[in-house]
Image: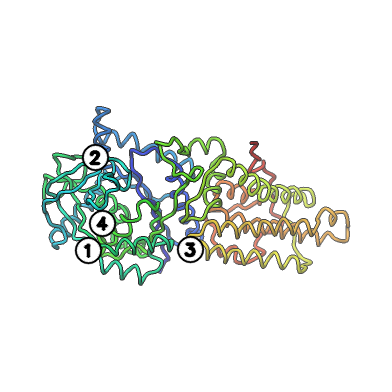
Amino acid sequence: MENTFYVTTPIYYVNDIPHIGHAYTTIAADVLARYHRLTGSKVFFLTGIDEHGQKVQEAARERNISPQEHCDEMVVRFQDLWKKFNISNDAFIRTTEERHKTVVQEILIYLYKKGEIYKTSYEGWYCVPDERFWTEKDLVEGCCPECGRTVQQIKESNYFFRMSNYQKWLIDYIEKHESFVLPQTRRNEILGFLRQPLEDLCISRPRKRLSWGIPIPFDSDYVTYVWFDALINYVSASGYLKDNDRFFPFWKNAVHLIGKDILTTHCVYWPTMLKAMGLEPPRMVFAHGWWTIEGKKMSKSLHNTVEPNMLIENYGTDPIRFFLLREGTFGLDSDFSHKALIHRVNSSLANDLGNLLNRSLAMTIKYFKGRIPKHSSFEAIDESLHEKAVQVVKKVDTHMGEVAFQKSLDSIWELIAMTNKYIDESAPWFLAKDTNKQKRLATVIYSVLESLRFISILLFPFIPSSAEKMWGALGMKESIDQQRLDNIKKWGMLKEGTVVTKIPPLFPRIEN
């Protein structure tokens, strides 16, 4: 059976201006998707936009246009940004699409007939910006515990999902499946949340208060609560109920990447909904941390957000992709600064990797007229480099399985550092002066270029455009995105006589 891998980002709220947090999650998902394609797996990578809810309705009303027109204008900001970041998503879901709405309604009908959904009157505190009900004990100094804004007391009839029926099942499931919620701190957080009685979930809003949503199919006076609607995108976009032969092979290997602020919805609401639907939860939900500025969470009110388009314009796409995944541990909070970014680009990309590529190509052109030489005359130092390269492939594979991007890049940089050291210790510039050491010189240059072949494939998921340029400079004719990790489990696959090409510096130093 063909190996599959399904990775998702959250569907981002259409009214938001894309910020560094959106980019962080999406780049991380892209790296996983690209890496698993290299393993030979059939990959489905989904991202998209959440377009329903009260805030969209109000924003459209203020602009005197329809909510759909508003969404059509806003969605472009995300689609354009993902193109700039070289995101390789296979699908882009919008919750206003018919393919999504029909699946949501079919699920609602199924759960209603099954007795999982019921109608009752309810009184509680409602946060309009977050579109969520809270109980008295949830409030923090009388305000919404999520956004800190004032809440309204509302009494109305609504439909509820019997989420409380699945509390014990969910606790048992999380305890038996250690990698379902990661990292460990988030798993502990959810288990702590589940120590309190789990209430049923309100899944509707009266149409008289909110009309912009998916209609409840069994009651035209209501629309679907935006979170119940939004979570279903993960199955509606991947073929559930429409193409189950395609859906189920992917779903068994589904990985959701999310920010820690939406942990409860993805690790409590969503698995209980799936259980009621008769589906297994995703294989993993990985909640990463926030990017902070000087230790403070980025927010529009503090005027400390980082605009991704500006970063790309100032530093380039691949340096930003690299920095976000190398600078911090995925799963923990990380602090952003332009100074740290510039230092990381100059030291790791310009000095370590860029100089390695430039001098390797220059020596091949100078000593062998730009052709990859025949290798022979092996010594212990060559074998050490070979062994390190193969070892790094295995280490990266382990780290990527743990969604440990920083560790993966650290391992690749071990090979980059060793290759630079290998050049310094082998001193090809001295070998070139001795006519009796031309075979040795050929082996050194070949080994360096072969190490770069390994490095370019391993880096392709992280910095795809730069890795592709490296690959082309080595004279490779096959497309790098068609390569497989099997090609770098063996040393010596470079063909002698292949012509390399000197290229401009991949990562020009950034001046402060």
Looking at the rendering, which quadrant does residue 67 occupy? Answer: top left
Left or right: 418, with 222 as reference point: right
Marks 4 and 2 close (CB-CB < 8 Å)? no
Label 3 crowding class (10 Å Cα cut-off): few <14, some 14-19, many 20+? Answer: some
- Looking at the image, is mark 4 or mark 2 earlier in the sequence? 2
Marks 3 and 2 close (CB-CB < 8 Å)? no
Please name the residue shown 20% across and 52% down the image: 203
Residue 108 is situated, as x and y percent measured from the top left of the image, at 18, 55
Kind of residue at disc 1: Ala
Kind of residue at disc 4: Lys
SS type, badge 3: loop
Marks 4 and 1 close (CB-CB < 8 Å)? no
Question: How far apart are the two marked residues, 4 and 1, measured between alpha carbons?
Answer: 19 Å
SS type, badge 4: loop
- Looking at the image, is mark 1 or mark 2 earlier in the sequence? 2
Question: How far apart are the two marked residues, 3 and 4, measured between alpha carbons?
Answer: 32 Å
Q: Which residue is more in the foreground, 336 or 452?
A: 336
Residue mark closest to the camera, 3 vs 4: 3
Residue that badge 1 annotates: 276
Task: Tell me if I can see residue 36 in this picture.
Answer: yes
Question: How far apart are the two marked residues, 4 and 2, measured between alpha carbons?
Answer: 29 Å
Residue that badge 3 annotates: 402
Residue mark closest to the camera, 4 vs 1: 1
Question: How far apart are the two marked residues, 1 and 2, measured between alpha carbons?
Answer: 27 Å
- Looking at the image, is mark 3 or mark 4 earlier in the sequence? 4
Residue that badge 2 annotates: 54
